[in-house]
Image (tube, rainbow, N blue to C red):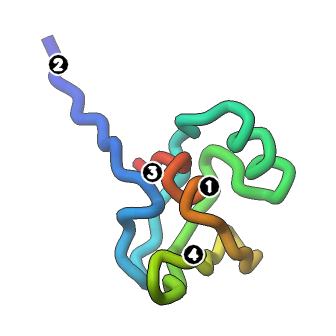
């Protein structure tokens, strides 16, 4: 029997500058929106910075920079 470790780390909990891989989404409707924006499973994503006081997240997805709301960032699960 082989034990596998699956990370449930969300993009909203990521640290700035660290690059991760998108695994899947926790919300299908937000996932569809994110996929149309270019945030696809298997994409490399890095948090550039967070806005103060719980504002948005500024992220780099592959070679694209986008801003996400907290609900969108928390629905992205990273490997």
Asked if residue 35 lies left or right of residue 42, the reply is right
Q: CA distance from mark 3 to mark 1?
A: 13 Å
Could you tell which of marks 1 and 2 lies nearer the N-terminus? 2
Closest to the camera, between mark 1 and mark 2, is: 1
Q: Is the residue 23 above or below the residue 64 in the image?
A: above
Residue 2: give its label: 2
* Residue 54 % position (x, y): 47, 76
**Dot 4, crowdedness within 10 Å: few (<14), some or many (≥20)?**
many
Place of residue 46 in the rendered image (x, y in percent of width and height, measured from the top left)? 52, 73
Q: Is residue 26 above or below residue 55?
A: above
| Residue sitting at x 57%, y 54% | 71
Q: Quadrant of the N terminus?
A: top left
Q: CA distance from mark 2 to mark 3?
A: 22 Å
Q: Do the residues bearing badges 4 and 1 touch, measured as CB atoms within 8 Å?
A: yes
Report which residue position mark 3 lands on. Answer: 78
Counting residues from the start of the chain, the first of labels 2 and 3 encountered is 2
Element assignment for label 2: loop
Location of mark 1 (residue): 72
Secondary element under disc 1, as helix, strand or loop, is helix
Q: Which of the two labelled residues, at mark 4 and mark 2, occupies the earlier sequence position?
A: 2
Mark 2 nearby-residue class (10 Å; few <14, some 14–19, many ≥20): few
Please name the residue shown 53% across and 86% down the image: 51
- State left or right for residue 47 relative to residue 67: left
Residue on which disc 4 sits: 57
Instruction: State the CA–CA distance, disc 4 to disc 1.
Output: 9 Å
Residue plotted at (54% across, 46% down):
75
């Amino acid at each position: 029997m082989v034990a596998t470790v699956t990370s449930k780390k969300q993009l909203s909990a990521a640290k700035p500058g660290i690059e991760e891989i998108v695994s899947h989404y926790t919300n299908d409707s937000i996932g569809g929106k994110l996929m149309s924006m270019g945030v696809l499973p298997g994409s490399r994503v890095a948090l550039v910075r967070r806005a103060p006081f719980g504002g948005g997240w500024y992220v780099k997805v592959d070679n694209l920079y986008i801003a996400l709301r907290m609900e969108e960032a928390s629905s992205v699960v990273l490997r």
